[in-house]
Amino acid sequence: MSVISKKLLLILSIAVIGLTGCTKKPIRPDPSLTAMGPGAGTGFDDGSMLNPTGVDTGLLDPSAIGLEERGPGYYEDDEIIRGILEPIYFDFDKSGINASERLKLDAAIMYLDANPQHRLLLEGHCDWRGTGDYNLGLGDRRAGSAREYLETAGVDPNRLETSSKGDLEAVENADESQMALDRRVELVVLKF
């Protein structure tokens, strides 16, 4: 670099620094005038600070403010409700519905009768064993079995949808008890 270039660069640098300048420090309020100051905003006349152990925990009870505690796996938004109906479980490599699981489908029928504005998505799942394509097909057959049961019981086919997730949400290399939980059809309520 030439001497002129260095001088020009130095002048430009000084100009940039001079034009941007330093920002002013903010004006801080007097602590005694804030809610955190001694006695301010605490509601105590003696100036003592709020004791966190003296907080009324009755206000933290969900039932006190009208909230209802739901079971694990419950989820609700503007479009769906998950976990309000129990999943239907299947034997290994089977898509037939066991007699013990039919009660859950009967509960789904009662729910649909009580909520005519809702529909049902039957979502088939498999455990991690088998190929991805095979498990997608098995999940579809499981969802189809649940749909057929509901239609045979009188549910309008237009209120039912099926999908298969195969082994997409299955726990890989799981033990037998986890695999039994992965072999299911989720009953997802659709609000629209």
Image: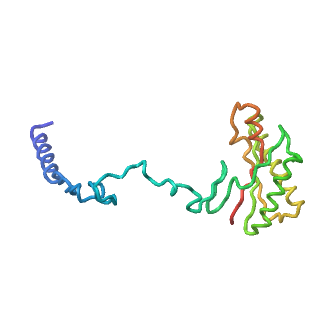
Above or below, comparing residue 175 to residue 146 in the picture:
above
* Front residue of 46 and 151: 46
Residue 70 percent location from the top left of the image: 65, 53
Can residue 163 be seen from the camera position used here? no
Colour pattern: rainbow
Q: Residue at x 28, y 55 (%)?
A: 47
Image location of residue 39, percent across then percent down: 28, 57
108 lies above or below 183: below
Q: Nearer the viewer, residue 107 or 46?
A: 46
The residue positioned 75% from the left and 45% from the top of the image is 125
Horizontal relation, residue 26 to residue 42: left or right: left
Q: What residue lies at 75% left-to-right and 51% top-to-bottom?
A: 86
**Relative to residue 157, is residue 134 depicted above or below?**
above
Residue drawn at (76%, 32%) of the image: 176
Q: Is residue 86 left or right of residue 46?
A: right
Residue 144, horizontal then vertical, whole percent: 83, 52
Residue that protrudes farthest toward the bottom in the picture: 117
